Image (cartoon, coloured by chain):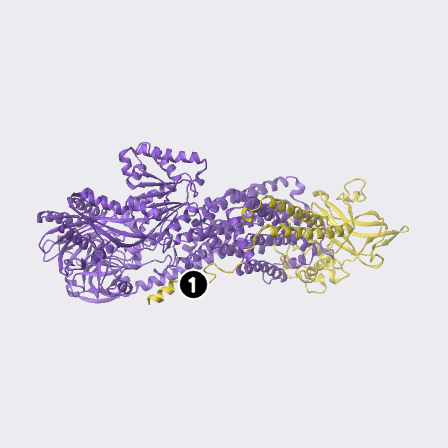
Chain colours: A yellow, B purple
Amino acid sequence: MKEQQETANRPDNTAFTQQRLPAWQPMLSAGIVIPGFVIIGLAFIGIGIALFVTSQNIQVLERDYTGVENNSPCFKCSDPSTKNCVCKLDFSLDKLFEGPVFFYYGLSNYFQNYRKYGVSRDDRQLSGRLDNFQSPDEGCVPYQYDANNKPIVPCGSVANSLFNDTFKLYQIVNGARKLVPFDGKGIAWWTDHNVKYRNPSITPLKNAFNGTVKPTFWSKPAYELDPSDPANNGFVNQDFLVWMRRAALPDFRKLYRRITEGDYKNGLPAGNYSLEIAYNYPVLDFDGRKKVVFSNVSWMGGKNQFLGIAYLVIGSLCVVMSIVMLIVYAKFKFPDEE
Amino acid sequence: MDFSLLRNLIRRYCVGEENWVDSRTIYIGHKEPPPGAEAYIPQRYPDNRIVSSKYTFWNFIPKNLFEQFRRIANFYFLVIFLVQLIIDTPTSPVTSGLPLFFVITVTAIKQGYEDWLRHKADCSINECPVDVVQQGKVVRTQSHKLRVGDVVMVREDETFPCDLIFLSSSRHDGTCYVTTASLDGESSHKTYYAVPDTMAFTTEQEVDSLHATIECEQPQPDLYKFVGRINIYKDREEPVARPLGAENLLLRGATLKNTQHIYGTVAIYTGMETKMALNYQSKSQKRSAVEKSMNAFLIVYLCILISKAVINTVLKYAWQWSPDRDEPWYNHRTEIERQRHVIRAFTDFLAFMVLFNYIIPVSMYVTVEMQKFLGSYFIAWDEEMFDEELGEGAQVNTSDLNEELGQVEYVFTDKTGTLTENNMEFIECCVDGNVYIPHAICNGQILSAEHEDLFFRALCLCHTVQVKEEETVDGIKRGIHQGRPTSFYISSSPDEVALVEGMKRLGYTYLRLKDSYMEILNKDDEIERFELLHVLNFDSVRRRMSVIVKSSSGEYLLFCKGADSSIFPRVVSGKVEQVKARVEQNAVEGLRTLCVAYRRLSPSEYEEACHLLTKAKLALQDREQRLAQAYDIIERDFVLLGATAVEDRLQEKAADTIESLHKAGMKVWVLTGDKMETAAATCYASKLFRRSTQILELTKKRTEEQSLHDVLFELSRTVLRQRSISGYGVEHLHTLDCLDFGLIIDGATLSAILKPNQEGSGNYREIFLEICRNCSAVLCCRMAPLQKAQVVKLIKASKEHPITLAIGDGANDVSMILEAHVGIGIMGKEGRQAARNSDYAIPKFKHLKKMLLVHGHYYYIRIAELVQYFFYKNVCFIFPQFLYQFFCGFSQQPLYDTAYLTLYNISFTSLPILLYSLVEQHVTMETLKREPSLYRDIAKNSLLRWPVFLYWTCLGVFDAVVFFFGAYFLFDNTTFTSNGQMFGNWTFGTLVFTVLVFTVTLKLALDTHHWTWINHFVIWGSLLFYVIFSLLWGGIIWPFLNYQRMYYVFMQMLSSGPAWLSIILLITVSLLPDVIKKVLCRAICPTATERAQVRTLTPAQEQT
């Protein structure tokens, strides 16, 4: 009885309870850290050089077309009262702009990441739920119902402010304008196009929108965004999808088209080009800017000096620090190590 | 507890002051006294139901919620949650509601389960059967139906159902044996005595015929005090009054032993008024220094939080001042939003508060509590602190103070039973200067045979030792050990046992106490019988005890034994000088000495003494005081017989432990009630004082010669001169080579120093503290229990506010154990009172070394890292969100997804730090034990000081800036996929968040010095969990959630090469400064700990 009690009180003699689990006890000692820093530093410098060179090889052509200055070709369109204004932006390339070329539009000082703006949408409606066509989500206020109390589809600020400038690119070949074909497929995320956004399964699509009105800013309803292609119409229109993915920062670019076809498969040859812009989107009243960007990409995406330079700097820093540490270690050795 | 208090208050103030009486009158068997006996004061008593549970089924939810939200952290999160519900906030209420709900639910389930267990325990106690005598019959009923005044019968091995007055026993001498193990842990059998007038009752009819009332004080929690009076009415005569004391009171929770049954016991305190229930009250909460720093940091963070919210609110309105920004066409406001500017500003402020509220870590409190609770198991589990003899290991009574064990600066230790074994061995006695040593030939010169006879008889009679004849389970071991399985001595005082056993070896055997006669077997094998008339019990103020006996020849003798200081002043004749010399000599050798004296009483003197004692014992009020007065009158005019010496050996490794504590930078003070010479000898033996130590004395002897003022100033001059010579600070004074000081002070001088009303006493106090500060060891002797606490308090309140630890084993140490920051009880021979009142209990003094140097050190570094890391990781978490506001028009747009906001602290980063705080060992246990000086590295809360906190916070801010701007420049106007597609804001946030989770986890990995498989599992596992969770969370459009903004965001990000590269880059950059700082600090100014790490590592490397 007594014996049993004693053994019951006795603590378990296991490695865990006695805090004696076998353990690896690493230490940031000179022997590990200095070679480690050198290796990391060299590796980073290597990556940095690769990134930097890749980035240098990327060609970018950027043109502002807001039309703030008087001599700007789109100055006439910048007055909000002009309707259906078209302006031409001419530029020339001295050498081949290697393909595939990506054509972006960019907006500045545009807060797509504004919280109230961002939540002003109805995901259920956009996934094709007809209930939400008749009664859009509360979050869409003030673009939930129009003045006649008719539901707006697609509702909300994000959809309402869809970017509606359109572009046509012409190459000037011997004074004649040759249309550069744009590829509008696959500019939005595959999952957005195929899973997240859905049109109601009603044909024709127009019927699904009965009793609703188009967003106030839009010139045409959602079911007429691309009547030629049902897979690019309504909520699955690629331009719409690109717009609906909010940008993180107030200066942003969005992919507009790719140039991958025909004569321009390998890029834009040297020569003169003219970009015809249907100028609809007002930005000046909030001091915004619009621009177009031609860019090609590498395996690491668009032109971005930052990453390469950062790698180079950090890599060199590591190497420098390892030298500093070496000196320090030589000077201040632990007394025990002597 | 609250209820009984409330009830008392109601009773006191609503019923009226007149009805509130200091004593209660109980009618035994509910029979009213004969008319005209005394005024009948009806009082209502609670029933015998024990309620230890806090909640009932109905009030559980509201009461538990109320209790939980009284905690400031929970309340804070509740407020945040409510704000989120009420106003339109950036994050959904789920983000703070879910963690809060989780924490509250887990706590509620835990508390509910504990309460359910308590209910069950209460139920089984309350329904346990009890035998009650009613109308002359024994009736079986349930415990909770007992009422005050019921007559109860208890059988052997049964537990008393309530506090009972003992009327009669099956034993003829009217005694019973009781063990109070469950009350105070003392497993020895204590004897209780029946009321003399009723002890003859043997049947329930007789008991039932008793007509009596009991007057006693109202319930109070002191287990060892009881004052009452029984009035027995017989045939309409004047009632006979008998005193009742603690020896008549059987306490609830105690168990009847070695007695067949006891009859006729009267319930006097029931239910929640029993002394056991009154002792349930929890002790005052002690808070650790770490907790205080934590709260200070928390306030800083609260200020940061508020200022962040204010800054953002102000900037928001400044930014919106220009109308084009205020409301661009693409982001129209609703009509409601356009109005009410002031209220809007306020809601904006609240919204920012909500957005940044994660900077105050919700889970920190939970994690800290879990760490403390789980971590304390390592103390209880420690096999090295398990004592074979006791069969018990260390015991943790509160887990709140684990880390305080690593911060101790002053150790106050008791001597007897703590430094020493409290295993007394009789060494010698001296009668009139002749020395007797057991098993040695006496020196033969018997000068006064009469005194010798009296001396040995005195020692055989003057004690409270019991003779245990029967064998019980507990007894086997000791019985065999003594070679005499039939009988052995038990007593609450080991000195007495040693003395009686020593007498046995000298030929005088104490046989037993039978029917008030003490029987002694003398040298010639004759049995002598003395009638025991009175016992004047020992108390620590008088420091002596006496018995009055009547010899067979009819002489009345008073034998007294006690400390020399309390005997010598009362001696009128005898060979005082010789005895005194011997006593002093013994004391120098570290022996415990007692003096023995006697006095012959004439019958008239006896009558007078008897009268005095009875009167004092019968008193209902101030009985203690009156008894003390009576004792003082009776115990005088002694004839000195001689002295005894008992050795109390030092505990195993006591010296080693003290040396280690010294090396660890702790100051060790010994506080003892013993006399100076004995205590000083022990101090030398335990290496508290070394040969080189210069002893400063501050004793009564010295202050009698000089004034206290002069002595103090002289000492302080000595100490200061030394310090100025050595030219070092205090820290260097107690290094080994340097001359160090030891101070000896006695209780009388100390109280003179501390006397508050004396002029310039504050001055004395300061000088005294200054002297103490410069002494490596201090010995306080002749201390009363309360003085011990005073000393602790004095040091606690001194200007450095050092952390104190008190360690002791006896009831006299309880006050200092409760007073000190950390109280440690030794499970000693003098009962369990110290262990019960302590924060930690250990079996032996030597275990203190491991407790402080290993466990305390570990807990401190663990919790310090835990606290700092928690603040760090939440700065990293929230600061990018703050920065993001500058790029989203101060619109309170959250950077991270809701799921990430919610789960960051709960699951992504919680387990690694919890595990770290449980198993981290920055140096091995062996090193810590071998090199106690490592303890100085963490002294004065060094890891939680403001510079360290600032470093961590700056590191957090730096990392946050790296995360945010790294991602910002990466996203700046470019794509980073090869298909040219652009990423949105959620990808941006996810990138930052991924870097964040990896960085903070790897930062912890860098800090971990002790990688067990569990660390690997948890650290890599939690990173893996984050990845898997993100894949799942983004991989499915979750049905019913209407939540799809994260759909494929994580996968898209991972599909891009630059994202990978930037994640690696940003993690490296964030960790770089910390690594460099660590490496450089280690090289340039390594701490002792870091040197030790190198030393332990190098031999290990050499071996491999």
Q: Residue B980's spot in the image, x, y percent?
A: 74, 55
For this rendering, which residue is in front, B955 or B241?
B955
Q: Position of residue A186 (x, y in %)?
A: 74, 59
Judge from the rendering whether residue B281 lies leftward or rightward of residue B1078; answer left or right.
Answer: left
Work out whether B759 lies above or below B628.
Answer: above
Q: Quadrant of residue A222?
A: bottom right
Examine the rendering and report whether any part of residue A261 can be seen. Answer: yes
Say few, some or many: other residues with alpha carbon within 10 Å of mark 1 (under 14 / 14 to 19 / 20 or more).
Answer: some
Q: Tag count in the figure?
A: 1
On the rendered structure, is B394 left or right of B1059? left
Residue at point 44%, 41% (across, down): B731
Horizontal and vertical percent for residue B317? 61, 41
Chain label for disc 1: A
Q: Quadrant of the N terminus of chain A?
A: bottom left
Q: Nearer the viewer, residue B347 or B864?
A: B864
Q: Is residue B582 left or right of residue B799?
A: left
Q: Amino acid at mark 1?
A: Asp
Q: Is residue B285 visible?
A: no
Residue annotated with mark 1: A12
Indicate the position of residue A62 as horizontal and vertical percent values.
Answer: 77, 47
Q: Is residue B665 above or below residue B238?
A: above
On the picture, is B214 further left or further right than B341? left
The residue shown at (39%, 51%) is: B656
Which type of secondary structure does the marked residue at label 1 adopt? loop
Direction right: furthest residue: A174
Q: Nearer the viewer, residue B997 or B724?
A: B724
The image quarter containing residue B503 is bottom left
